[in-house]
Amino acid sequence: MKWKATLLMAILVFAVIASGCIGSTQETKTETSKVTLTGDFTKDVIEIGKILQQNGINEVKFAAWGSGDPNSVMRVYGIVDAAYKINKIWEQNGIKVKITVTTKYDQSFKDQYQEFLSKQPLGQAGDFFVNSYAFLPTLAEEGYILDITEYAKAYQNVIDDFYPNLLEAAKYKGKLYGLPQDTEARPLYVRKDVAKCAGLDVTTLPEDVKSGEFTWSDVYYWAKKAKEKGCAEWGLIHRKGSAHPDLIQFIFAFNGKLYDPNTGKLVLDVPAVYKWLYVEWKFAQDGLLPKDIMSWDWAKQIHPTIVEGRTLFDIGGTWYWTEWQTKQYYHGRGLRPEEVKEWFAYTLFPAGEKGDKPVTLSQPFIWMINSKAGQLNPKYEELKDVYHALAFLMIVKASDSEINAIHSVISAHLPVRKEAAKLIKDENWLNKLKNLDLDLAPEVKDNIKDIVEKTVNPINAKFLADVSYMLEYTHLAPAHPKYPALADIFKEAVDKVLRGEMTPEEAVKFIEDKIKADKELADNVEIKGEIPKEWEFPRGD
């Protein structure tokens, strides 16, 4: 029996040793599949590279999705450049791992959002997704984007350089789900030669708008005068498509609200929405604004009408300034910076009426990370945290102040970081950008060189500096999951009012009925106020 006891003891010892080995293996596995960020970018990148190399990974593949106007391509090439910078660090430290990035850039940010929404559950969406903050709540609620709150704590020095109100746009329920990529203002552009023909002095106009003296009744008055005198074909042109975000400025200009922070619900502010629709209706019915503007073609109708001087006013965005220089909207060519400066004045979006305040509206775009980022790479489940940490470091590098400044200058968006704002005022740096004498990925240089050639100019930098004050008047559309659905209803109503298919009163009822017919919207939208009975537009006072 003694031998049995010896055998049993041997089995127990072997089990303990085996258990220890397994535990040791698990610890080693944990150590090589987890990373703790320190805030030292180079150190963190090297640590991640070593973990990947130890696990036999020599290539990491990511896809970057972005969208917008033709000059905003840094929304994807910022990620490409981040990969380039990280690859250099790895190469300099003998780490044989390389990141490759494929890009997808579309014109419609809304269409790309819908594509991301449908393909993310299937594992077919981009690893990086830069899009409007307005969609962030839905993506966060669905679990489609990465919560980067913990990662960001190590990079508080970077986080603190973003403008606070823009950083708030990247949050949902107190958690950080991305980093601001850009923002903008939406000026009212005024064609100077048409204004002169009509008798409108634009030299004091920005201040008159800022003080609330020049309101939408004045816009109507001068638009009508310009057309009656034959100075222009139209009095006003504005953007088409979704009523978010451009046209909802009217709601804020008429002192309305779209969201109640106390209830967490959206608001249909009936008096403000009625006044907005009435202004649209009045301009269209009097022939000052095209009735079918919501279906106009961007490149063939909207922009040519503006740059050829066939309208006095235009509701546009700051990015128009350089888009007009890079696209062939003006009789088959782009405008020169000197021409844009000579032909266009710009103001805040005027107050609805005396006593109200001028506004602008910003729609920050946000770098977001797919919650499945890196999923097509080897050992994804085992190395998920490593891939996610690497993705976070890539948006940190893509948010580098120089990358942000480049994007701002070539696309006429406003910088989201204070350090980037300093760079765009630096003439020496502008000259380096003009000559592409900057450390950028060759692929990035190749893809932005034509845009840089046409846009990098002191005139454009001064424009950005001039309009920065508008952010003090800016509003954000509600970051509410049901807001896009409400915005689509607004768009339908505006189109029907412009075409004369509905009166403003009928359009308000149309909006109310649409909300009530959708249970989710009905539960999330408060309908407040009534159509003002004694209100008139335009007002003579």
Image (tube, rainbow, N blue to C red):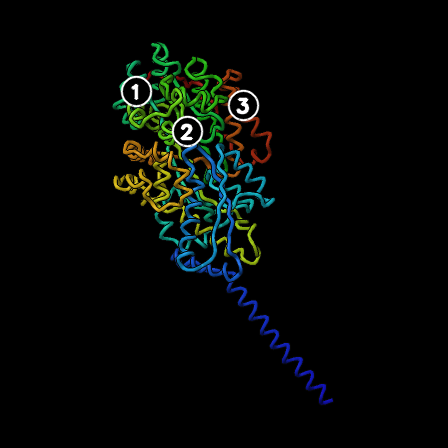
Can the viewer see residue 299 in this picture?
yes
- Residue 512 left/right relative to 313: right
Classify 10 Å Cα crowding around label 2: few (below 14), some (14-19), many (20 and above): many
User: Looking at the image, is mark 1 or mark 3 earlier in the sequence?
Assistant: 1
Q: Closer to the camera, 14 or 159?
A: 14
Residue to which mark 3 is pinned: 509
| Residue displayed at 41% across by 42% down | 444
Q: Name the kind of residue labelled 3 in the image.
A: Lys
The C terminus - image quarter:
top left
Q: Nearer the viewer, residue 218 or 95?
A: 95
Looking at the image, the residue that sits furthest to the right is: 1
User: Is residue 212 visible to the viewer in this orientation of the structure?
Assistant: no
Going from N to C along the chain, the mark reached first, 2 or 3, is 2
Q: Are marks 1 and 2 in contact (CB under 8 Å)?
A: no
The residue tagged 1 is 192
Residue sitting nearer the eye, 275 or 484: 484
The x, y position of residue 493, in whole percent, is 51, 23
In the displayed structure image, the side of residue 451 where residue 146 appears, left or right: right
- Tell me the distance, in whole angstroms, between the alpha carbons under discs 1 and 3: 39 Å
Quarter of the image where one finds residue 6? bottom right
Mark identifier at residue 249? 2
Counting other residues with Cα less than 10 Å from the Cα at mark 3, is it few (<14), some (14-19), or many (20 or more)? Answer: some
Q: Residues within 10 Å of mark 1 (few under 14, many from 20)?
A: many
Quadrant position of the N terminus in the picture: bottom right
Label 1 or label 2, whichever lies nearer to me, is: 1
**Across the whole image, how many numbered discs are drawn on residues?**
3
Instruction: Identify the element where label 3 is drawn.
Output: helix
User: Mark 2 or mark 3, which is nearer to you?
Assistant: 2
Q: Position of residue 50 (x, y in %)?
A: 47, 61
How far apart are the two marked residues, 1 and 2, measured between alpha carbons?
23 Å
Quick check: 363 above or below 224? below
Q: Quadrant of residue 182?
A: top left
